[in-house]
Amino acid sequence: LIYFFRLFFLEIAFTLFFIGGSYNFYLNQLEFSPHRIAHAGGSLNEVYYTNSLSAMTHNYKKGFVYFEVDLSLTADGDIVCVHDWFGIKGPIDWNGVPSTANFRKVVAESTYKPCTIGSLEQWLRQYPETKLITDAKADNYKTLKMIASAYPWLIPRIIPHIYKPEEFDPIRALGYNDIIWILYKYEGSEKDVLNNVARFRQPFAISLGVKHLRRRLQFVLRQFNKDLVIYAYTVNSLSLACKLINYQSITEVYSDALSPKESCDADKEIWNYYYH
């Protein structure tokens, strides 16, 4: 009888151990994995916002694996890699929304050739360790649903931006697991931000621009959730990136030009040596 109880309790102990291990593994799978993000595909020849495969390939060789790309719709409703149609940002002055045919014609004659969703899909096949961060300039949900329908295999390779908290659940329901809430369009209060961060399920990250950094929202978020992945955009100075990452609660940055190989570890060691 004693032997039976020993076996019984030993079996319970092993079961709890393996359940606990599986639970911890599950929790680890839910964590957002942060890497530096190449903004608009990263710069090429010191030109920003090309959203081109050439820029992405160039920056992949510099160590980037996360690529943010701007996505717009042509007049025909096709997804292409353009920040805007009115010459605000990008090497091509479109002067209005073109048809898909006109888009292809202009791109063929341009030095910097923004991609289409089709060519981008092929590029992602070629570089399987990379991930795409989408910055949809038109209808975010519609754009992501179109991609999920046309290229379902791409879903695990995409980290969508959302711009308002109401988008989180519908976009997660499309199958997109990792999500970044970027705040450049959000007009809610800091209290609203905290309430929604508490509600969102992992894996997700939040991305802050100058307005929120100046308000020191990153410190409030870090105090609220010590493990939250917090990005800052867009940072092209290594000294600023190191200041944000080492001393201002930022996890990583979006950058046009700072490769992931430009680390802030040495800066932190110097600071600790002199001031601690």
Image (cartoon, grey):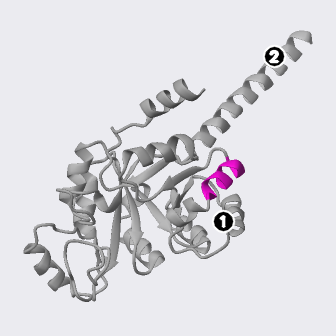
Residue at position x 54%, y 48% in the image: 250
Residue at position x 22%, y 67% in the image: 115
Q: Residues within 10 Å of mark 2 (few under 14, many from 20)?
A: few
Q: Does residue 132 appear in the picture of this structure?
A: yes
Q: Badge 2 is on which residue?
A: 7
Was residue 26 drawn as part of the magenta stretch in this picture? no
Q: Residue furthest top?
A: 3
Percent across and percent down for residue 88 are: 30, 78
Which quadrant, please, contains the N terminus? Answer: top right
Reply above or below: 102 against 238: below
Q: Amino acid at mark 1?
A: Val
Res 106 → quadrant: bottom left
Q: Mark 2: which secondary structure?
A: helix
Q: Mark 1: which secondary structure?
A: helix
Residue at position x 27%, y 61% in the image: 121
Reply above or below: 192 against 73: above
Res 216 → quadrant: bottom right
As rendered, which of 4 and 249 lies closer to the eye?
249
Distance Cα–Cα, label 2 vs label 1? 51 Å
Main SS, magenta region, reads: helix
As rendered, which of 230 and 140 lies closer to the eye?
230
Q: Badge 1 is on which residue?
A: 193
Q: Residues within 10 Å of mark 1 (few under 14, many from 20)?
A: many
Reply above or below: 16 against 2: below
Look at the numbered discs 2 and 1 and tell me whether their residues touch, using CB distance below 8 Å: no
Q: Earlier in the sequence, mark 2 or mark 1?
A: 2
Q: Amino acid at mark 2?
A: Leu
Q: Residue furthest left?
A: 109
Is 138 positioned to the left or the right of 64 in the image?
A: right
In the rendered structure, which segment of residues is drawn in magenta? Answer: 216-225
